[in-house]
Image: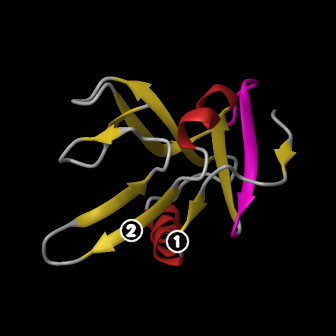
Amino acid sequence: MAAVATLAPISLTDRAVVEVKNIIQEKNVPDDYGLRIGVQGGGCSGMSYLLGFDKAKDADEVYDLDGLKLIMDKKHAMYVLGMEVDFQDGLNARGFVFNNPQAKSTCGCGSSFSA
């Protein structure tokens, strides 16, 4: 299992932390799982964000972020360095929002970007 690193390359707003903890409780996510954040090829701008629950693998870094176990593939850090994940719960939008300073362009859906 990957070792716990000190400083996470991303941050979660208080609203995002509360929502993730609610999901963990509601969905009975196992204790050995953490919140995986990363990127994958695809989407309308070339890359899209990954957000889900998973077990840490050998190529991962594990961070403690406000009591949440955050898991990220080491290779993904350069694409999300400095990113803030927020949670919107308004009339027009509900869901996680990615504010990524590394993104050169984003698409209208907000979950795809180019770096």
| Element on which disc 1 rests | loop
Query: Is 10 situated left or right of 3 in this image?
Result: left
* Location of residue 2 in the rendering, given as x and y in whole percent from the top left corner: 81, 34
* Location of residue 16 in the rendering, given as x and y in whole percent from the top left corner: 47, 69
Q: Which residue is drawn at the image coordinates 47% and 45% (left, top)?
A: 52
What residue sits right under mark 2 in the picture? 87
Circle 1 packing at 10 Å, graded few (<14), some (14-19), many (20+), is few
Q: Which label belongs to residue 13? A: 1
Query: Is 46 situated left or right of 90 in this image?
Result: right
Please state, as top left, top right, bottom left or bottom right, where the C terminus lies in the image.
top left
Towards the viewer: 9 or 31:
9
| Highlighted range, magenta | 56-66
Q: Amino acid at mark 2?
A: Phe
Tags 2 and 1 touching, CB below 8 Å: yes
Q: Which residue is drawn at the image coordinates 21% and 78% (left, top)?
A: 90
- For this orientation, the residue located farthest to the left is 92
